[in-house]
Image: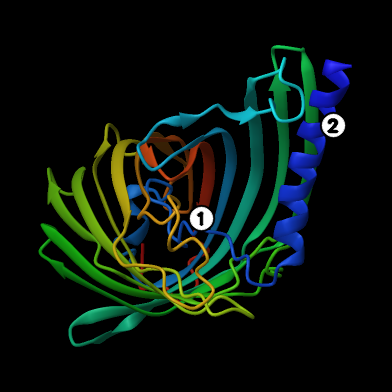
Amino acid sequence: MKKLILFTIIYFLSFSLIKAQNESAQHVSAYQAGSYQTGLMNIRDLADPGAGIFFVDYNYWNNSNSFYDRFGNKVSGFEIDLSPIDPSLGTTTLDLSQQISGYINVPVLFYASKFKILGARYMASLNPVFLSSNYKMNIHASRTDTTVISSGNTGGMGDFSFIPLGLAWGIKNKLDFSFFYTVYAPTGRYETGASDNIGKGYWTHQFQLPTYFYFLEKATALFVMPTFEANGEVKDSDVRPGSRFSVDYGISQYVTSWLELEVLNGHNWQISDDKGNDVWWQDTPLYVKDHTSTFSFGVGVWPWEGRLNVRAKYVMDYGTKQRYKSNFLSLSAIFIPNILSAGK
């Protein structure tokens, strides 16, 4: 009987939380992690590529099994007091385990001009996103060996991004300095309170300043890039997620003319408050600015010199607060068709 009581409580507790989120139009998620993820790009992706059209295909496999609270502690369970129902049950600990996995594909069409603007090469790109995601959550009461399992999946086209303005300056093979303005459009499926959203439901304007310092005739590249994100209002709500600031830095080394190794580190912070009348988490412990850091290492090869580059890398989060900690496996390819190019 105690097991049945506990099972019923766990089930209705889970059901009530999901139902409350689905029925309230104001229940925008309190966990807004922004549009840019540090560590995922390859170090030389935003360096001046020379004039031409480039086809790039990014593939990411994501895995996460833990959420970290505002103190940076892993959330592995919670306690409920069952004594009002059955005094013999007292306070019971419910263990929480969760598994989230996904796949993201980003095919990119990138253009770099032959002409110059203010001494800089003009660049632009189109970046559609396609993704799928699966989750499984277990709530387990070890005291009575009772478990409730919830699972689901979603997939489709995510938020489309494009670069209308990119400018790159170079100084005698010693320095590359660029500016990129990127727009994220809310084209992915989104409905406030839904459990199968793909998009974020708001526009993002992103500004980046990638800088490369070269040594040994560009064989060695030291890289640093600050990123700023300004977010619009969430669809059908009065919520504007706070702005974010990120910084990536690392080193890329060509061991041979066809083999490249890289190490990249990054940090991402929410730097301004979420605003709006529908920010229901404003007076709760959820109202904190999240943060995460990311470390990645990768290898790149040129199986077809000057035409095809293939790269693989592993990405892991650390120092995470108020968000999920994730690991990524990335495979990408760059194909250079020599269209509109100014030579090799």
Expressed as whole percent of the image width and height from the top left, the position of residue 144 reads: 76, 12
Expressed as whole percent of the image width and height from the top left, the position of residue 63 reads: 59, 35
Left or right of residue 242, residue 190 in this image: right
User: Which residue has dot 2 on it?
Assistant: 8
Expressed as whole percent of the image width and height from the top left, the position of residue 180 reads: 33, 73
Depth check, front residue: 303 or 17 = 17
Q: Quadrant of the N terminus?
A: top right
Q: Quadrant of the C terminus?
A: bottom left
Q: Are marks 1 and 2 in contact (CB under 8 Å)?
A: no
SS for tag 1? Answer: loop
**Quarter assignment of residue 24:** bottom right
Left or right of residue 80, residue 230 in this image: left
> Three-letter amino acid code at disc 1?
Tyr
Q: CA distance from mark 1 to mark 2?
A: 28 Å
**Quarter assignment of residue 197:** bottom right
Can you see residue 103?
Answer: yes
